[in-house]
Amino acid sequence: MRRLTWFNTTSLTLGFAFLYLPMVILIIYSFNESRLVTVWAGFSTKWYGELLQNQAFLDAALVTLKVGVASSTIATVLGTMAAYVLVRGGRFFGRTLFSGMIYAPLVMPEVITGLSLLLLFISIGLDRGMITIVLAHATFSMCYVSVVVSSRLVSFDKSLEEAALDLGCSAFEAFRLVTLPIIAPAVISGWLLALTLSLDDLVIASFVAGPSSTTLPIKIFSSVRLGVSPEINALSTILILIVAVGTISASLVTKRAVKRRQMEEKMAGD
Amino acid sequence: MNFRRFSLISVPYLWLFILFLVPFGIVFKISLSDYAISIPPYTPTLDLTEGWAGFKAFLSALDFENYVFLTEDDLYWKAYLSSLKIAVFATALTLLVSFPIAYGMANAPDEWRPTLMMLVILPFWTSFLIRVYAWMGILSQEGFLNQFLMGIGIISDPLIILNTNWAVYIGIIYTYCPFMILPIYATLEKLDPSLNEAAVDLGCSRTSSFWLVTLPLAKPGVIAGCFLVFIPALGEFVIPSLLGGSRTLMIGKVLYEEFFANRDWPVASAVAVVLLLILIIPIVMYQRNQQKMMEAEQ
């Protein structure tokens, strides 16, 4: 009996209020005139203006974006390879170790990952900077990518690949012409996930970043440790809006794609 | 084995080996070293110029002293215990908050469900740091919550929540509840409504059919959700350092401070190794549960 009782309605309302009210309050207070963040003193967009003047934040945002794009691209390539090896690779020496190394980083506390990577970089004499952050982020996000991609690889019909091979494709051509287009949505969402993880990461980055490569989360963390500030509210609002617009439009696009495919299948059936 | 297959396997393999496995070896090695005022700040360092003798001297200088230190100094075992306590309690609270939401979602009309799912996932894509930060302004003494409660006359003096363990609980519930809601929703959604109808037809009340039918069938999802909250909560760093007070002891924060404030790398490494050993148990249990769920589906 699927039905919305008053209990269901109340728990959904309260639950989603709990999930969204804090962010709504944050957004409202980013338009507060007063520097005292808790006292409402009228509508103003001045903190957004001050934010755009703040060179340190802009520099950090640029570093974060560069690191994010570089690390998520590396992570997508490596993660897709790893997923392909796990699902289609058959048996090879050390397969258990390999799948362990894919799943372990997903549950590893960030402080441990950060500490261990930093000690590695120091012992091989690699200077801390953007490169070390990219390496660190690519390593943990490739595991997320490979989980996303392998779930897609498991669910699609292997005989499509075999048919391509029978018809004279080389293994690489079969991958490029058959497999890749089919798993493309998973690869893209893996890339987006890796990008989000990288843009969001504070703990690992603060271990492996050098003094010249402060990322946005590091910058935000060091200023919110001192307390709530209206500039950070403004910055958070911008970031929340970017994510909301991105996620909602991505879901609308997939919804439309699914609808179109259903239409096509229906027309093909008629 | 052809070359292409070899390189396809070896590239991600080597990457993870060098950037994931080797670093743990290094952490373990440094945890056996001693603190020293030098660069890097530990001793011994491996000197291969002296050949085999140098290696033997290096090995003999390693010991478990730091682990003994962890058991002797109150701070560490108290921090482990208090992290465990906070993680267990926070997981239970997250379950209490999340189950009704997941249950409501599973009972919602079909056409609402994709939207509800997206509303649960959306916060997950939003910066973790910002979601924790949002609570700083709400929970402080002059914050939104106190203003609201005093405004409607429930309390006359502001509650002190920020910088206490309560704020840490609220932070964990808020940031991790999507991890609890989604697996529970996934099991409840697959649940056949006719099972409940049968129970009611056979004389169960709606409440007892919930306890006797729905809840046991939702168990795998509940277990998965609990581990997904408990494991990361145990090593949490951001939430205790922004919302917790100076008396909030969590091992992730201790490790961070040991490394950055005290610069005692060997002790920080030992703290990390012990934390990892503690985490192995719930991680293995979680994987068992996932395997059982997979087998049940097939």
Image (cartoon, coloured by chain):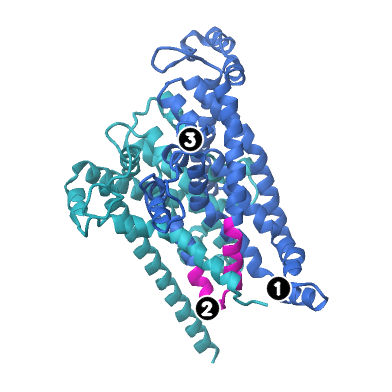
Q: Chain of mark 2?
A: B
Q: Chain of mark 1?
A: B
Q: Which residues are magenta?
A: B97-116
Q: Answer few, some or many: residues within 10 Å of disc 2's Cα (few below 14, many 20 plus, some between 14 and 19).
A: few
Q: Earlier in the sequence, mark 1 or mark 2?
A: 2
Residue placed under numbered mark 2 in the picture = B111
Q: Nearer the viewer, residue B88 or B284?
A: B88
Residue sitting at x 50%, y 69%: B116
Instruction: Give percent across and percent down for residue B286.
Output: 66, 48
Q: Give the numbered dot on residue A111.
A: 3
Vertical position of residue A3 compared to residue A194: above or below: below
Helix, strand or loop at disc 1? loop
Vertical position of residue A125 compared to residue A245: above or below: above
Q: Can residue A237 be seen?
A: yes
Vertical position of residue A252 compared to residue A121: above or below: below
Helix, strand or loop at disc 3? helix
Q: Which chain is blue?
A: B
Q: Colour of chain A?
A: cyan
Magenta: main secondary structure? helix
Q: Are discs 3 and 1 located on one and the same chain?
A: no
Q: Nearer the viewer, residue B105 or A138?
A: B105
Helix, strand or loop at disc 2? helix
Q: Chain of mark 3?
A: A
Residue sitting at x 70%, y 58%: B219
Q: Are discs 1 and 2 located on one and the same chain?
A: yes
Amino acid type assigned to the residue bearing label 2 in the image: Glu
Residue sitting at x 45%, y 45%: B159
Residue placed under numbered mark 1 in the picture = B192
Cα–Cα gap, marks 3 and 2: 41 Å
Q: Are marks 1 and 2 in contact (CB under 8 Å)?
A: no
Q: Answer few, some or many: residues within 10 Å of disc 3's Cα (few below 14, many 20 plus, some between 14 and 19).
A: many
